[in-house]
């Protein structure tokens, strides 16, 4: 199934000059969503990992479903001040601003292998922050899987330079 045709493109969102790739049109179609999850599961099965980490918020949709199918624990990587217990925090740059990502300190045991799943990679800021949180927690990044890669913004290349395995299902230009 060509998942690309299920992604809606919205110009000038969330700010002028950004072409937003909207996954809500993919997840509202049961066949497209199932195909997407099946593809993520197939990639995941080739990776050795103990837990799945989901990046807030759209990553939760895909990672929780894959976690259920593969019977793996799910870790939430949340935006600033969303986690109630002791946490690690990493600040990072986005294509259109700055943000903070956090993880509970008790989410990962030393040397546990973690697969990170998110809906999209653009400049790689959020993904690199997610990987830093896994490592700060004592874990090891087994890989990252994205539904969409905005290939001309260079995020996946940044992850490859850090020797992180990463793969995406769909490629779009960023602008």
Image (cartoon, rainbow, N blue to C red):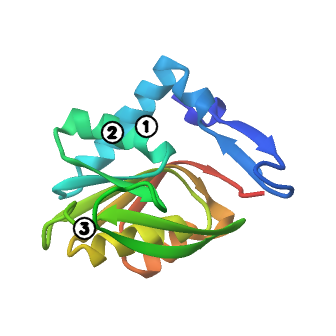
Distance from Cα at disc 1 to Cα at disc 3: 23 Å
Residue 29 versus residue 93 in the image, above or below:
above
Q: Secondary structure at mark 1?
A: helix
Q: Is residue 58 left or right of residue 48?
A: right
The residue identified by callout 3 is: 105
The residue identified by callout 1 is: 61
User: Which residue of the protein is positioned furthest toward the top in this rendering?
Assistant: 30
Q: Residues within 10 Å of mark 1 (few under 14, many from 20)?
A: some
Rendering quarter of residue 50? bottom left
Distance from Cα at disc 3 to Cα at disc 2: 20 Å
Mark 3 or 2, closer to the camera: 3
Q: Is residue 124 visible?
A: no
Residues at circles 1 and 3 in contact by the CB criterion of under 8 Å: no
Q: Secondary structure at mark 2?
A: helix
Rendering quarter of residue 166? bottom left
Residues at circles 3 and 2 in contact by the CB criterion of under 8 Å: no
Q: Is residue 15 visible?
A: yes
Whole-percent x, y for residue 52 in the image: 27, 52
Which disc, if any, is residue 64? 2
Q: Residue at x 24, y 34 (%)?
A: 68
Q: Earlier in the sequence, mark 1 or mark 3?
A: 1
Residues at circles 2 and 1 in contact by the CB criterion of under 8 Å: yes
Q: Earlier in the sequence, mark 3 or mark 2?
A: 2
Q: Residue at x 62, y 37 (%)?
A: 4
Whole-percent x, y for residue 93 in the image: 61, 74
Q: Is residue 145 left or right of residue 98?
A: left
Q: Residues within 10 Å of mark 2 (few under 14, many from 20)?
A: many
């Amino acid at each position: 199934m060509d998942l690309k045709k299920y992604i809606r493109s919205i110009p000038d969102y969330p700010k002028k000059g950004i072409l937003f790739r909207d996954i809500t049109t993919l997840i509202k179609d049961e066949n497209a969503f199932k195909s997407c999850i099946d593809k993520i599961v197939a990639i995941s099965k080739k990776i050795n990992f103990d837990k799945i980490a989901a990046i807030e918020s759209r990553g939760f949709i895909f990672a929780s479903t894959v976690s259920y199918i593969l019977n793996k624990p799910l870790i939430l990587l949340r935006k600033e001040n969303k986690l109630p217990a002791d946490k690690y925090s990493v600040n990072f740059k986005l294509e259109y601003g700055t943000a903070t990502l956090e993880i509970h300190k008790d989410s990962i045991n030393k040397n546990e292998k973690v697969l990170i799943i998110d809906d999209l990679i653009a400049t790689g800021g959020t993904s690199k922050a997610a990987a830093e949180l896994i490592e700060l927690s004592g874990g090891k990044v087994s890989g990252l899987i994205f539904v969409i890669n905005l290939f001309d913004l260079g995020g996946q290349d940044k992850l490859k330079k850090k020797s992180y395995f990463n793969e995406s299902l769909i490629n779009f230009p960023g602008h």
